[in-house]
Image (cartoon, rainbow, N blue to C red):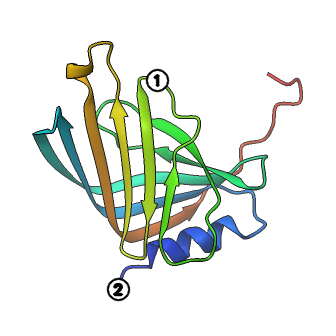
Amino acid sequence: MPSLPISSTFTNFLHQSSPAPLQVTFATLEIRNHQNGQFLNHLQRRQSRIILQKTACKDVAELTVLDNLVFRFSFQFRLPGVEQCHNMEMLSLLRPLDHGRLYVDEEKLQLSFRIDAPDPSLRVEVTHQYQDICHLERLRPVAANPQGW
């Protein structure tokens, strides 16, 4: 069975009215790390997941990386238009992560970001490349807390 086109799947989800987050499972995830321009390592994982959801701000969405090497993290990005390829800046990226970019086309989802460090020689550049959507699952929307906490 052919894989679903990634960019179209994202665009369709982000432009519909349902508030339910979408968990996307990809057949493969490749993670590459570089430090000071030198290759550190390469890791390949199967069945890696992300969660895509809309935010209260109508032109911003959020992506949560569930299968990172060290910890789960989220970032926001501006909603893409309807063009085939999307190259976007990661917004609201938590420290020590910075300089994040999100690239989406029909064949891959690529995240690139830096793990910052006080000593610039210790900074690590990380690239996650997801391919081949193998499962989509709607999750329950998280209800807002009526007390505001």
Looking at the image, residue 101 lies above or below residue 26: above
Q: Residue at x 25, y 31 (%)?
A: 124
Circle 1 is placed at which residue position? 95
How busy is the neighbourhood of tag 2: few (under 14 within 10 Å), some, or many (20 plus)? few
Circle 2 is placed at which residue position? 2
Q: Position of residue 29 (x, y in %)?
A: 28, 56
Q: Decide which of 55, 120 is in the foreground and name it.
A: 120
Looking at the image, residue 112 lies above or below residue 24: above
Q: Residue at x 78, y 41 (%)?
A: 143
Quarter of the image where the N terminus is located? bottom left
Residue lying farthest to the top in this orientation: 118
Q: Position of residue 51 (x, y in %)?
A: 53, 52
Q: Residue at x 42, y 76 (%)?
A: 106
Residue lying farthest to the bottom in this orientation: 1
Q: Position of residue 123 (x, y in %)?
A: 26, 26
Q: Decide which of 51, 88 is in the foreground and name it.
A: 88
As drawn, is 101 to the left or to the right of 124? Answer: right
Q: Position of residue 133 (x, y in %)?
A: 39, 70
As drawn, is 44 to the left or to the right of 148? Answer: left
Q: Residue at x 57, y 41 (%)?
A: 91
Looking at the image, residue 7 lies above or below residue 97: below
Quadrant in the picture for residue 19: bottom right
How busy is the neighbourhood of tag 1: few (under 14 within 10 Å), some, or many (20 plus)? few
Quarter of the image where the C terminus is located? top right
Three-letter amino acid code of the residue under disc 2:
Pro
Element class at badge 2:
loop
- Looking at marks 1 and 2 on the same chain, the residue that comes earlier in the sequence is marked by 2
Three-letter amino acid code of the residue under disc 1:
Arg
The reply to whether the C-beta atoms of the residues labelled 1 and 2 are less than 8 Å apart is no
As drawn, is 107 to the left or to the right of 88? Answer: left
Element class at badge 1:
loop
Kindly report the distance in space between the C-alpha atoms of the residues bearing marks 1 and 2.
38 Å
